[in-house]
């Protein structure tokens, strides 16, 4: 199995989806509960892979460093955002390499990004609240030429759902269900 | 030494890829198999299928019938290496834990009989059940199962599942409202038995399949008590059908084996669990199973013929309180049985006067049926739930699932009905004469 991905099964799945598009629809969900201070706990909801229910029994915590009034008990939301982005780009890169027959030995992606908290704090009107820029470097060892790797990089970003979510406008529809308690 | 030929299924090839393309350019599609897609059926009938499907003559000598490929390993060539690299090793001969021509032959026969795209044989029915269930469930997943499951399956769900963070809700298999209500967001599987043991409830599988499909859950059915001559379980919307092949499929009480059959997609998901859990079937056992299967249709007709006559005899006997045989009009599921079963089986459960003590005297007095657990063999087998299949239950637990004192589990073989009746006649006479003597 190249890169521990069964190319045959990947190919069969792609062709199955071409014939039955409902098999491509993935329903995801998570639930976040506030624990204390800046710390919260996320749990995955069961997901649907095509029309089939799948259990996802995973959870993790997020926190801020003490300097930001937290207790440093977990990665912070920005790190989790970069992790979600980078892990998705990784899947795309590995799947693309496998489909093209490239044997990989190591792949590492380094992410760096600078956030100016003045946006969050509301101190400056000119500062972006979010990341204005995200920098990364992919370090790869494998049996392809630098040109092939460059092309794989381009295609893997173009097909990465999380990269494309960040690069493109996305709707964020929320509502709040509140219960008022006595002071 | 190497071999450059395709040693395996020639219909299965590596996906062609165009340099600079993307995943959508991969062109390999799923086929029935291994081998099935390339082998035309010898006929439409179940008996023809039982005799011919999967079976092949020796290509070198013309010897009729599948040779026994008693080999643990195979000469490798570029073709097999490529199949490992590209992830279709299931379609090549590499090592017998992965696959062996003797396994493929009997798998093809079983898939053809069940109307499946693919099948895998295992070293036991429990190996088939464990591999199938673990392939279709993820960490934290939940299964809805019937409350009168086979003990081995019950133990898997009860003893092993919690270790994997998995859970099970057991529900009365007649209660479709309760079955549907038991489905949770993390439920991945509904697991039922086509005909239950020992009360021989015939489960309305089409209704289960409708619920499973509507609620996006997979349906797995253990059809050990309903081999494909009686019912093609997959035809009723089941995702994977499982059998203990040690019973009717093999039919001679001389091996332990199991099988899972269904779509190629799902059976390909189960195959890595066969590799990981190691429940592969030995080539010689495959030969025995393949040979046994050739007479499946004719054996099932004989089971039904003798069992029907004996069931009527027992029902008319004054010392027999109840008889459960799905083709008796008195059976609670007679209508379901008539709708779903194309052929009866040899299983009869009955309750005699005098409780378990009388039942013990009866099984000791019988000459033809062997006092042994298991079922589906050419020889009649008889056992008592209270000291075998439900021995760990208290008498109240047995009563709760409908097993009354004096309950006898009989698997009618293919012996002549007249001989079986004569044997029961003398044994019942002995049973009750001894009882009277003990009171004297």
Image (cartoon, coloured by chain):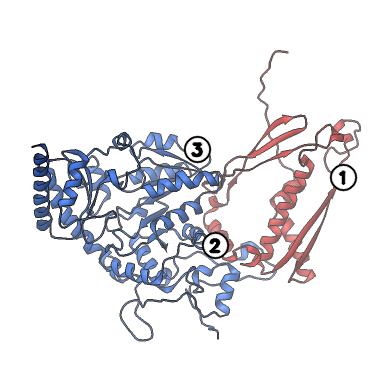
Chain colours: A red, B blue
Mark sitting on residue B167: none
Q: CA distance from mark 3 to mark 2?
A: 30 Å
- Looking at the rendered structure, which numbered label has been put on residue B184? 3
Residue B385: x, y in percent?
Answer: 28, 45
Query: In which quadrant of the rendered image does the C terminus of chain B lie?
Result: top left
Q: Which label sits in the foreground, 3 or 2?
A: 3
- Name the secondary structure under disc 1: loop
Q: Residue at x 28, y 43 (%)?
A: B386
The answer to whether marks 3 and 1 sit on the same chain is no
Please name whichever residue, B409 or A165, is drawn nearer the observer in this view of the structure: B409
10 Å crowding of disc 1: few (<14), some (14-19), many (20+): few
For image coordinates 13% across by 43% down, the residue present is B315
Residue tagged 1: A114
- Dot 1 or dot 2: first in sequence order is 2
- Image spot of residue A110 (x, y percent): 81, 55
> Foreground mark, 3 or 1?
3
Element marked by disc 3? loop
A72 above or below B312? above
Quadrant the N terminus of chain B occupies: bottom right
- Tell me the subunit letter for badge 3: B
**Residue under circle 2?**
A12
From the top left corner, tell me how far across and down residue A70 is, in percent: 81, 33
Query: Where is residue B351 shown, x and y percent of the image?
Result: 19, 41
């Amino acid at each position: 199995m190249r890169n521990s991905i069964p190319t045959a099964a990947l190919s069969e799945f792609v062709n199955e989806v071409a014939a039955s598009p409902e098999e491509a629809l993935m329903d995801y969900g998570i639930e976040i509960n506030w624990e204390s201070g800046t710390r919260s706990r996320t749990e995955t909801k069961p997901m649907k892979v095509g029309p089939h229910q799948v259990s996802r029994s995973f959870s993790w915590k997020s926190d801020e460093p003490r300097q930001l009034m937290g207790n440093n008990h977990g990665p912070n939301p920005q790190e989790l955002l970069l992790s979600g982005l980078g892990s998705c780009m990784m899947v795309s890169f590995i799947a693309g390499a496998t489909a093209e027959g490239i044997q990989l030995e190591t792949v590492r992606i380094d992410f760096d990004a600078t956030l100016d908290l003045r946006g969050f704090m509301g101190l400056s009107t000119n500062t972006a609240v979010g990341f204005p820029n995200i920098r990364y470097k992919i370090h790869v060892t494998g049996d392809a030429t630098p040109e092939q790797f460059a092309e794989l990089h381009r295609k893997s970003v173009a097909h990465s759902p999380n990269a494309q979510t960040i690069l493109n406008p996305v709707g964020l529809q929320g509502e709040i269900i509140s219960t008022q308690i006595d002071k | 030494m190497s071999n450059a030929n395709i040693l395996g299924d020639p219909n299965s090839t590596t996906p062609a890829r165009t340099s600079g393309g993307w995943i959508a350019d991969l062109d390999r599609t799923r086929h029935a198999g291994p081998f099935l897609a390339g082998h035309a059926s010898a006929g439409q009938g179940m008996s023809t299928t039982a005799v011919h499907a999967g079976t092949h003559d020796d290509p070198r000598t013309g010897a009729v019938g599948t040779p026994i490929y008693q080999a643990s390993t195979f000469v490798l060539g570029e073709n097999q290496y490529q199949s490992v690299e590209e992830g279709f090793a299931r379609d090549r001969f590499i090592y017998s834990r992965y696959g062996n021509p003797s396994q493929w032959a009997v798998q093809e026969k079983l898939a053809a009989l069940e109307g499946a795209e693919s099948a895998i044989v295992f070293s036991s029915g429990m190996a088939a059940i464990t591999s199938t269930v673990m392939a279709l469930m993820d960490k934290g997943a939940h299964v809805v199962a019937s409350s009168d499951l086979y003990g081995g399956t019950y133990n898997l769900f009860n003893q092993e599942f919690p270790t994997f963070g998995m859970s099970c809700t057991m529900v009365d298999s007649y209660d479709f409202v309760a079955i549907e209500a038991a489905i949770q967001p993390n439920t991945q599987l509904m697991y039922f038995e086509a005909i239950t043991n020992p009360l021989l409830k015939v489960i309305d599988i089409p209704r289960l399949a409708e619920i499973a499909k509507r609620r996006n859950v997979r349906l797995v059915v253990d059809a050990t008590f309903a081999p494909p001559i009686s019912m093609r379980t997959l035809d009723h919307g089941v995702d994977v059908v499982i059998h203990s092949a040690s019973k009717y499929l093999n039919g001679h009480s001389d091996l332990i084996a199991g099988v899972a059959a269904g779509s190629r997609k799902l059976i390909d998901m189960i195959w890595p669990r066969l590799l990981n859990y190691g429940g592969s079937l030995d080539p010689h056992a495959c030969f025995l199973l393949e040979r046994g299967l050739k007479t499946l249709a004719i054996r099932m007709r004989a089971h039904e013929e003798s069992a029907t006559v004996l069931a009527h005899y027992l029902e008319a006997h004054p010392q027999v309180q109840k008889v459960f045989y799905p083709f008796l009009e008195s059976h609670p599921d007679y209508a379901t049985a008539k709708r779903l079963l194309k052929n009866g089986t040899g299983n009869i459960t009955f309750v005699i006067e005098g409780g378990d003590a009388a039942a013990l005297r009866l099984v000791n007095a019988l000459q033809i049926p062997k006092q042994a657990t298991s079922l589906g063999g050419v020889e009649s087998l008889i056992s008592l739930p209270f000291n075998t299949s439900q021995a760990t239950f208290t008498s109240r637990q047995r009563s709760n699932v409908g097993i009354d004192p004096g309950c006898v589990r009989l698997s009618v073989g293919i012996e002549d009905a007249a001989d079986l009746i004569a044997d029961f006649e003398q044994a019942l006479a002995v049973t009750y004469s001894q009882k009277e003597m003990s009171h004297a």
